[in-house]
Image (cartoon, grey):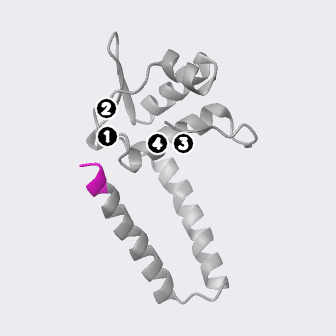
């Protein structure tokens, strides 16, 4: 599924959350797909089951997953994902910082727009993969 970086400054829990979100956003995991059980993933990653459970709970809170008692944990459809305005604001600030850096590196506004358009085009490829 994915690998963890034990030397990373990010906690194991955060790495699991980020990895599962990335798999969902890139279409590797599709809507309604069943995820490994907490025990299965715990054994695969050699991580405490409580850590997996905490990551699944966080992903559920963020709307990426849902759990059905007795059946397991599944990827939520995009329509069920609730926009987190706080997270959107954080990402906007990161984008502003990176755009300032691109200007500093000598990129024109047109070049930056071209880069953003290129990235948005890649996004449409992600959507095609998840269909």
Estimate the spatial distance between the alpha carbons at disc 4 and disc 2, rounded to whole Å: 13 Å
Mark 2: secondary structure: loop
Question: Compared with residue 18, is residue 91 higher up or lower down, i.e. above or below?
Answer: below
Q: Which residues are magenta?
A: 127-131
Q: Earlier in the sequence, mark 1 or mark 3?
A: 3
Q: Which residue is mark 4?
A: 21
Estimate the spatial distance between the alpha carbons at disc 2 and disc 1, rounded to whole Å: 6 Å
Q: Which residue is mark 1?
A: 30
Q: Is residue 131 left or right of residue 105?
A: left
Q: Which residue is mark 3?
A: 18
Estimate the spatial distance between the alpha carbons at disc 3 and disc 2, rounded to whole Å: 18 Å
Q: Are marks 3 and 2 in contact (CB under 8 Å)?
A: no
Q: Are marks 2 and 1 in contact (CB under 8 Å)?
A: yes
Q: Earlier in the sequence, mark 4 or mark 2?
A: 4
Estimate the spatial distance between the alpha carbons at disc 4 and disc 1, rounded to whole Å: 11 Å
Q: Are marks 4 and 3 in contact (CB under 8 Å)?
A: yes
Mark 4: secondary structure: helix
Q: Is residue 25 left or right of residue 54?
A: left
Query: Which residue is rendered at x = 52% and y = 23% of the image?
Result: 41
How many residues crowd mark 4 within 10 Å: few (<14), some (14–19), many (20+)? some
Which one is closest to the eye, mark 4 or mark 1? Answer: 1
Residue 114 lies, in percent from the top left, at: 43, 82
Q: Is residue 52 left or right of residue 75?
A: right
Q: Could you say which quadrant of the image residue 61 lies in?
A: top left
Q: Is residue 68 left or right of residue 61?
A: left
Estimate the spatial distance between the alpha carbons at disc 4 and disc 3, rounded to whole Å: 5 Å
Q: Earlier in the sequence, mark 4 or mark 1?
A: 4
Return the residue nearer the eye: 46 or 127.
Answer: 46
Estimate the spatial distance between the alpha carbons at disc 1 and disc 3, rounded to whole Å: 16 Å
């Amino acid at each position: 599924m994915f690998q963890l970086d034990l030397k990373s400054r990010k906690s194991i829990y955060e790495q699991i959350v980020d990895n599962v979100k990335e798999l969902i956003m890139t279409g590797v995991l599709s809507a309604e797909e069943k995820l490994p059980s907490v025990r299965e993933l715990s054994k695969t990653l050699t991580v405490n089951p409580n850590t997996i459970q905490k990551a699944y709970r966080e992903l559920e809170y963020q709307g990426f997953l849902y759990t059905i008692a007795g059946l397991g944990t599944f990827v939520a459809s995009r329509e069920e994902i609730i926009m987190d305005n706080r997270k959107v604001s954080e990402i906007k600030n990161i984008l502003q910082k990176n755009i300032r850096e691109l200007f500093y590196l000598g990129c024109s506004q047109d070049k930056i727009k071209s880069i953003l358009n290129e990235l948005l085009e890649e996004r449409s490829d992600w959507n095609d993969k998840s269909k």
